[in-house]
Amino acid sequence: MTQPYPGPYQGPGPYQQRPYPPLPYPAPIVPRYRPLRKVAIVSIVLMGLTSLAAVIQSVLLWRSYDEVKRLVYGLLSEEEIDRGVESISGTGPLLNLVSYLLMGTGIAFLIWLWQARENTDFLYSPFAPRPAFPADPVRGPHRRASGWVVGAWFCPIVQFWYPFQIVQDITKASEPPEAPRSGRARTLLYSWWATWTAFWVILVGGGAVAVIGFIVWFIRLVQVSESSDAGSPYVDIYDMQDFMVRVALGVDIGFTVATVLLIVAAVAASFLMLQVTDWQHTRATPPPIQDQPRPFGPPQYAPRYHRPGPNFPTYGP
């Protein structure tokens, strides 16, 4: 016979094992869509300002070329020398402005590129209104990891093709599957990368040539001074003057060509950014109700209302 419990249940004893609460599982990381229109507009505006500042800088360089030429040949008076030095030094702040605008444009473009990469992860997830499936389910639609979106631009050697691959993968992943393959995005992509690479090659290469040319001119000037007649007060430096004039002309021509390439790259990048932004917005927007796919299976009908009759069972009191 069982004995009744002597009192209310007081819970488990001091030595009885208590059940542990379930461990909380980390919430899954759900990708989400970020609109790109504002970031794209800011980046495009900065591209336009950078191109405009580069054009003004190029015009000022050509306007000061004659004064630089006369300064090298020693044909300027003291007043003209002071005015020429001021004119030449006046282009320095504008050149710094071009550099600052170029850095600001790069930061805005990288922000847009990073968000566009994250949006492609959303478009290829089951949370998207129109989910897509990558051709390679293991690697996904991208050939490089997300960290290369920023690091590819600063890593030596690979910076000549990694950024292009990243933008190319984002463009392909953003294009709607039902969109016609017109080749417009490919043309913009290749035009942007070719002109952008050529711009940096000319800019960096031209600066290096100018610095090397000045060093060579200074060394040759020292050599001529040491080899000249000590009793003669004159030193024949006409060849070195000619050399410096050619260097100044080469700098002006190189900067002008680089400015043209920068403008072409800015136009191509602007149209490409707008196209990718529009594609991602279209794919992230839910389709209209009449365009949504119908569920599989036979159609479902609502049950009809039957009036109770003599042969219809009723339930009630």
Image: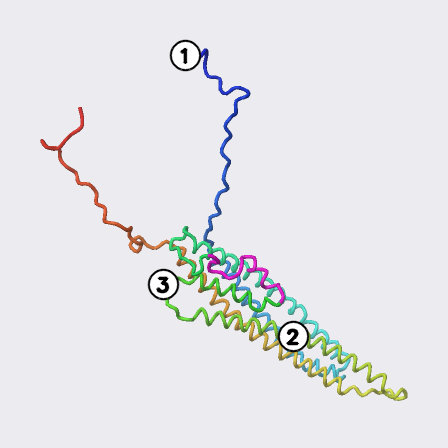
Going by the numbered disc 2, the residue's amino acid type is Gly
Going by the numbered disc 3, the residue's amino acid type is Glu
Residue closest to the eye, 233 or 90: 233
Residue beneath label 3, please? 178
Q: Residue at x 44, y 57 (%)?
A: 137
The answer to whether marks 3 and 1 mark residues whose Cβ atoms lie closer than 8 Å is no
The disc label shown at residue 205, or none: 2
Could you tell which of marks 2 and 1 lies nearer the N-terminus?
1
Residue 147 counted in the magenta span:
yes
Residue beneath label 1, please? 2
Spatial CA span between label 3 and label 1: 76 Å
Could you tell which of marks 3 and 2 lies nearer the N-terminus?
3
Looking at the image, residue 268 lies above or below residue 33:
below
Q: Which residues are magenta?
A: 138-156
Spatial CA span between label 2 and label 1: 99 Å
Going by the numbered disc 1, the residue's amino acid type is Thr
Q: Residue at x 48, y 62 (%)?
A: 170
Label 3 vs label 2, nearer the camera = 3
**Where, by quadrant of the figure, is residue 103 drawn?**
bottom right
Spatial CA span between label 3 and label 2: 44 Å
Examine the residues drawn in magenta and state their main secondary structure. Answer: loop
Few, some or many residues within 10 Å of mark 2 (<14, 14–19, 20+): few
**Where, by quadrant of the figure, is residue 82 drawn?**
bottom right
